[in-house]
Structure formats: structure tokens, C-alpha cells
Image (spheres, coloured by chain):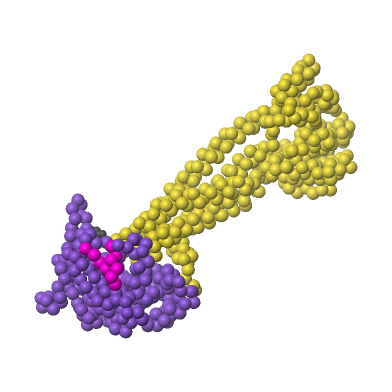
């Protein structure tokens, strides 16, 4: 075997293997927590709500409908670049009421235009849907959750929207679409409103929402007023909001969660810092004599200090790898279970980058004391220690 | 071999330690000349300052007053870094309790100071093998210190001290923890290093047999050196 400085490092890391392993586990736990929490945060942040797009819903409540006929009026309104309409199917995968699944009947062409920045509807996908009346486009995360592939036949149950066959709706998967960003919620499917509307036995020509893409330079508040005033004397009054305001409750929740995430992460890291700093102080104190010997042999203070720093850094990097590795392993499992709360759970590059920075800073803070002590250690008194 | 002298010169050296608010002197105005190639044994009661003298000569402790120079270079003038580099090249330390790195093998312990030299890994290995041969432990190269006897550990300690070929060896009670037989082997080894390899050796010891191998013996008592011959017969 060949002696190298890295061998000294390994020697120090393995001399008390239990201690090193416990420290790595401890650091790993903190980064596991950090990884999980920041993924949740990224999941919420990734909410595709946009301030410039508008949502028109019934003034009475979220579950009430609006007449499809409003579409023409909205289209004709100045400041409106594109309008689309959405009817929620309220469909279940099975008879189990917990098994609800997002399924929206839409006009594919206008929908793709209004939400062009949010989802990736390729020409091939659009064509596949146009070619197949009972086709559906399935969001990537829903397709992965259900294990659906293009061409699969699927069957959904809707208790509010019966057709001639009863409550069962059969579709075939025409394609799978992605979000424009990995954090965009794609846990739903889109079916053709023309097919849906004709197949319905009651409740035809009703929609839940209109989505509006305002023309560039339009004052959104003025447009909102214009829309709601237009239908003020109609049987179904509207309530128009920006998409972010529409998702308001959700976003408020996000703000709270963000604060909690930061708080919990900070507490976790502060705890880790105390534990590791304490452990390193003991580890170095135990080695006082050896450090003294290294200095007697002619190893300079900075070299000895570097050894202590490197040792701590390695511990933190191993902990970091362990923690984020565990996060990456657990997220897919959690993602399935929590898909109704958080759209997409995944470890963002930003979270990984900040974890690396945090690890480096914590390692420095942890090692600073012991390393400086090693640097300054008076050799003569170090050798007196037994 | 170069003939540059490495005489050790202590001129009017004083050293004290703080005790509360005052300072306790260990010795004052101490003067000592150790010529190149000497083998000096320093004896004296515990606490008389023997280790302190070795530490001063090795540049790991500083005098309060006076100058310590080696080969004409005053240690007090050197900065911390220069002193560390100088020590790596010129001084080998041997300790009473060996102070080997517990998780490095015998050979790796000997190689440790060579990491500071420009030698290649191959040259280092060759040097280590040569030195292990000199101290008679070629067959223990891969053993950990805990797998060696006290005498063997001390021989590795000496091998490490001479690995980078320093001119001066400072030994602090090198036989203090050994049985008679091992102690004699260590003393013989040191004598060989002095006689055959020309190392200047300063050895602090309680071991009367040391006088057998040393060229000179001095007694440090109450802050002063007295020649061994001047000591009372009972000592
Ligand atoms: N770091 C220190 N602080 C205070 N006193 C010390 C220190 N180091 C040594 N001494 C004192 O200095 C004296 C000489 O110590 P030392 O050189 O180790 O003696 P010896 O090696 O002869 O036994 C002793 O009385 C010891 O207690
Ligand atoms: Mg001593």
C-alpha cells in the first residue's frame, strides 16, 4: 500500500467507524428532511397559476356551471386574445369515491392556445386527438401513476355526467402530454368537449370555467370588470379572476408551507451543526497528541488544519449524498400518495445546489473551531497529553 | 557527505512557566555546547527541565531569553513556517511512548515524514525498506503498532525519526517504557546511529546504562548542568 495524505484522511475517518457512521447518518437525516421539504416547496411553487391569465367561473360557486353560449360573447370582447372552456367530468377510476381523477372536457385547439406556455401539446398529440373522437390526452404524471400507454382503453365513472350507457365512459389514450416545466401538474386528462357534449343525456352545453388569455397590453382589472359587467344581468352571473387569485387559497397555503419549510430546515441544520461541531471537537481533542506528532515531524499547521477540514467536509458530503439519495428514493413513493395535494414531487436542481452549499458551509462552521485549534496547537504541550 | 557542522549552541537560555500570575523559572542563564557528532545523555530528576531543553533545541518550544542556534542558525529568528520546514529536514524526535500513528503500519509510520520530501513514492518505499532493515524490522513492515512489542515500536519510532535523514536526533527517555533487554537493544541502535551514521544525539534518560553508549553525560539539577563525574557517588 502507498502512503498518501488521503490515506491519513481515511485513517482519521475510520478510526472510530461508529462515530463517523453515526455522524453521516445524522447529517444524512437533516438533508433527507431538507430534500423532502424543498421538494414539497418546489411542488407548490411550480403551480402553473399565472397572473396574466383569467378564469371565468360562476359567481354562485365553484361547482355551478355557466352556459357554453358565453364563449361567443367572450371571444368578441376587446382585450381577449383567446378563450377556451373547461367542463369537469368529476370522474372516478372505480366505484371507490376516493379514487377521483382529474378529467376535463375541453376544446383542444383553443385550450392548447390559452395554455400553450404551461403544457406541451405537440402537433402530433393534437392530430392524434383530432383523429379520435373518444380519445383523451393524459398528463404524464397521471399516465405514470395509472400505468397508461398510448392506445390503452380506459373506463371512467361519472356520477354527475351520465351518457346513454349510464355512468360509464370509455376512452382510449390518444397520447401523453408533458408540462412545460417539470413542476407543472400533469395529473389529469383532457377529453374532447364535442364528443362529451353530444354523448351527454343531460346537462349539455354547460361549462365550469372559461380560460382567457388577454391580448398583450390589456389591463387585466379593466378586462375583469368588462366581463363581469357583460353578464351582470344574465341568469348566470360570472366571477372573473386572475388565475393566481383563483388559486388564492391554495397559494396562501403555499406561503405558510414555505415558511414552515424554512423554519424546520433551519432548526434541523442548527441541530446538526451543534451535534457535529461537538463531535468534531471531541474527535480532534482525542487526537491532540497525534496532531502534535505530525507537527513535530514537520507537517505545517495549515496542512494539519486542512486534514481536519477535509475530514469534516467528507463527512458532510457523504451525509449529503445519503440524505438526498434517500429523498430521491422516497419521493416517487410519496408523490403517488400525495398527488392530490402536491402536483409533482421531485428533487429540483436548485434544491440539490442549495444542499451542496449548505453542506459546505456547515462543514466549514463545524470544522472551523477544531481546525483552528489544530493550527494553533502548541506542539510542546500537545506532546504532554496522554 | 557534507561537512557542514550542526553544532548545537544554547547561550544564556532562560525558560519559565506561568503559575497563576507569577512565573516559575525552570532554568536561567543556561549555556550548553553540543558539537556535531556528539552523543549527549542528559540525566536529572523529574521536572528539572530535561524535556524542555529537547523541545527548545527541536524548535517546538521557545525560550524566554537567550539564543539557541544550530549549525550557526538562530532558531528564534525563524518564523513558524520556516522553523517547521527546518525541523523536518534537520531534527528527528524519539519519544518515550513512541507516538506512532495507531492505524498506520510500521512501514507507513516510517514513510510519514517522507511525505514532506520531494521523493517519489518508489524512492520513499526504497528508503523505508532500507531503514526498516537498519532497525532490524524488515519482517514487521505491515504490522500495526499494536501488533508490535514496546521495543519494536520504539525501533519503528527511531526509524521514523531518521527516515528523512536528519543530522540530529532528540530522544526523550527512549528506554523509559522498556524492559532491560529491549532498552539495551535501543541503546545499541542509537549508538550505531551515532558511531556509524554520524548522527548527533541528545538523549534525556533516567537509564544509567545510557552512560555506556553516550560519549558524555550531563546532570541537570536545579537549573544547572553538572558533569556526571562531579555528581555525588550515590547518584
Ligand atoms: N506547559 C507547561 N505549563 C506549566 N508548567 C510546565 C509546562 N511544561 C512543563 N512545565 C513544568 O516545567 C518543569 C520542567 O518540565 P519538563 O521539561 O517536562 O521536565 P522533565 O522532562 O525534566 O521531567 C516541570 O516542573 C513542569 O511541571
Ligand atoms: Mg520529561
Q: Residue at x 75, y 20 (%)?
A: A226
For the residue pair A61 and A93, the one nearer the viewer reads as A61
Can you give x and y, in whole percent of width and height, for residue B175 in the image? 27, 75
Q: Is residue B225 above or below residue A224?
A: below
Quadrant position of ligand 1: bottom left
Image location of residue B120, percent across then percent down: 48, 74
| Dominant secondary structure, magenta | strand
Position of residue A141 in the picture relative to residue A133 (left or right): left
> Considering the image in quadrants, where does the C terminus of chain A appear?
bottom left
Q: Nearer the viewer, residue B100 or B39?
A: B39
Residue A377 in percent (x, y) is at: 34, 58
* Occupied quadrant, residue A114: top right
Depth check, front residue: A361 or A154: A361
Is residue B48 something that shows in the picture?
no
Q: Which residues are magenta?
A: B66-76
Can residue A227 be seen here? The reply is yes
Whether A210 is drawn above or below B45: the answer is: above
- Check residue B72 for magenta coloring: yes
Residue A269: say if magenta.
Answer: no
Up/down of A94 relative to B31, above or below? above
Left or right: B209 in relation to A374: left
Q: Return the x and y of residue A164 as percentages of the image width and height.
A: 88, 33
Q: What residue is at 41 percent from the left and 61 percent from the top?
A: A304
Image quadrant in which you'd find residue B196: bottom left
Q: Colour of chain B?
A: purple
Horizontal relation, residue A124 to residue A144: left or right: right
Number of callouts: 0
Q: Is residue A281 left or right of residue B96?
A: right
The colour chain A appears in is: yellow
> Which residue sits at x=72%, y=45%?
A141
Q: Residue at x 19, y 55 (%)?
A: B23
Amino acid at each position: 500500500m502507498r502512503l498518501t495524505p488521503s490515506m491519513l484522511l481515511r485513517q482519521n475517518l475510520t478510526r472510530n467507524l461508529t462515530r463517523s457512521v453515526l455522524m453521516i447518518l445524522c447529517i444524512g437525516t437533516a438533508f433527507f428532511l431538507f430534500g423532502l421539504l424543498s421538494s414539497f416547496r418546489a411542488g407548490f411553487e411550480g403551480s402553473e397559476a399565472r397572473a396574466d391569465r383569467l378564469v371565468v367561473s360562476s359567481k354562485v360557486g365553484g361547482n355551478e356551471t355557466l352556459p357554453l353560449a358565453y364563449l361567443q360573447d367572450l371571444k368578441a370582447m376587446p382585450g381577449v386574445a383567446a378563450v377556451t372552456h373547461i367542463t369537469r367530468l368529476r370522474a372516478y377510476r372505480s366505484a371507490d369515491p376516493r379514487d377521483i381523477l382529474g378529467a376535463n372536457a375541453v376544446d383542444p385547439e383553443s385550450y392548447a392556445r390559452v395554455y400553450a406556455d404551461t403544457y406541451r401539446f405537440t402537433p402530433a398529440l393534437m392530430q392524434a386527438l383530432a383523429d379520435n373522437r373518444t380519445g383523451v390526452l393524459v398528463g404524464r404524471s397521471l399516465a405514470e401513476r395509472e400505468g397508461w400507454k398510448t392506445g390503452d382503453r380506459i373506463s371512467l365513472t361519472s356520477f354527475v355526467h351520465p351518457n346513454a350507457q349510464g355512468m360509464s365512459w370509455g376512452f382510449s389514450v390518444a397520447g401523453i402530454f408533458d408540462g412545460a416545466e417539470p413542476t407543472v401538474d400533469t395529473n389529469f386528462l383532457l377529453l374532447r368537449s364535442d364528443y362529451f357534449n353530444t354523448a351527454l343525456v343531460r346537462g349539455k352545453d354547460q361549462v365550469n370555467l372559461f380560460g382567457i388569455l388577454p391580448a398583450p397590453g390589456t389591463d387585466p382589472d379593466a378586462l375583469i370588470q368588462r366581463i363581469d359587467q357583460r353578464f351582470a344581468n344574465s341568469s348566470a352571473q360570472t366571477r372573473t379572476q386572475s388565475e393566481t387569485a383563483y388559486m388564492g387559497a391554495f397559494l396562501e397555503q403555499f406561503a405558510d408551507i414555505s415558511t414552515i419549510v424554512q423554519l424546520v430546515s433551519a432548526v434541523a441544520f442548527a441541530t446538526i451543526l451543534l451535534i457535529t461541531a461537538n463531535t468534531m471537537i471531541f474527535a480532534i481533542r482525542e487526537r491532540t497528541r497525534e496532531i502534535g506528532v505530525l507537527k513535530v515531524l514537520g507537517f505545517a499547521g495549515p496542512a494539519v488544519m486542512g486534514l481536519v477540514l477535509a475530514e469534516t467536509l467528507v463527512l458532510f458530503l457523504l451525509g449529503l449524498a445519503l440524505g438526498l439519495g434517500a429523498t430521491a428514493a422516497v419521493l416517487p413513493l410519496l408523490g403517488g400518495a400525495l398527488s392530490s395535494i402536491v402536483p409533482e414531487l421531485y428533487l429540483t436542481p436548485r434544491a440539490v445546489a442549495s444542499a451542496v452549499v449548505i453542506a459546505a458551509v456547515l462543514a466549514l462552521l463545524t470544522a472551523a473551531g477544531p481546525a483552528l485549534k489544530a493550527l494553533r496547537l502548541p506542539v510542546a504541550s500537545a506532546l504532554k497529553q496522554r | 557527505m557534507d561537512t557542514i557542522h550542526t553544532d548545537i549552541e544554547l547561550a544564556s537560555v532562560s525558560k519559565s512557566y506561568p503559575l497563576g500570575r507569577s512565573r516559575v523559572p525552570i532554568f536561567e542563564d543556561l549555556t550548553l555546547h553540543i558539537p556535531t557528532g556528539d552523543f549527549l545523555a542528559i540525566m536529572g530528576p523529574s521536572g528539572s527541565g530535561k524535556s524542555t531543553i529537547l523541545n527548545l533545541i527541536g524548535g517546538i518550544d521557545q525560550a524566554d531569553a537567550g539564543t539557541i542556534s544550530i549549525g550557526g542558525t538562530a532558531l528564534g529568528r525563524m518564523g513558524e513556517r520556516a522553523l517547521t520546514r527546518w525541523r523536518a529536514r534537520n531534527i528527528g524526535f524519539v519519544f518515550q511512548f513512541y507516538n506512532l500513528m495507531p492505524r498506520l503500519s510500521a512501514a507507513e509510520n516510517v514513510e510519514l515524514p517522507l511525505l514532506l520530501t520531494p521523493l517519489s513514492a518508489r524512492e520513499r518505499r526504497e528508503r523505508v525498506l532500507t531503514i526498516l532493515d537498519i532497525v532490524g524490522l524488515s519482517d514487521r513492515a505491515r504490522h500495526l503498532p499494536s501488533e508490535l512489542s514496546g521495543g519494536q515500536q520504539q525501533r519503528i519510532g527511531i526509524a521514523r525519526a531518521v527516515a528523512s535523514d536528519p543530522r540530529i536526533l532528540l530522544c526523550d527517555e527512549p528506554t523509559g517504557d522498556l524492559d532491560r533487554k529491549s532498552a539495551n537493544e535501543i541503546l545499541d541502535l542509537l549508538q550505531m546511529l551515532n558511531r556509524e551514521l554520524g548522527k548527533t544525539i541528545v538523549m534525556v534518560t533516567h537509564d544509567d546504562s545510557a552512560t555506556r553508549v553516550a560519549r558524555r553525560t550531563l546532570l541537570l539539577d536545579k537549573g544547572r548542568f553538572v558533569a556526571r563525574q562531579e555528581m555525588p557517588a550515590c547518584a
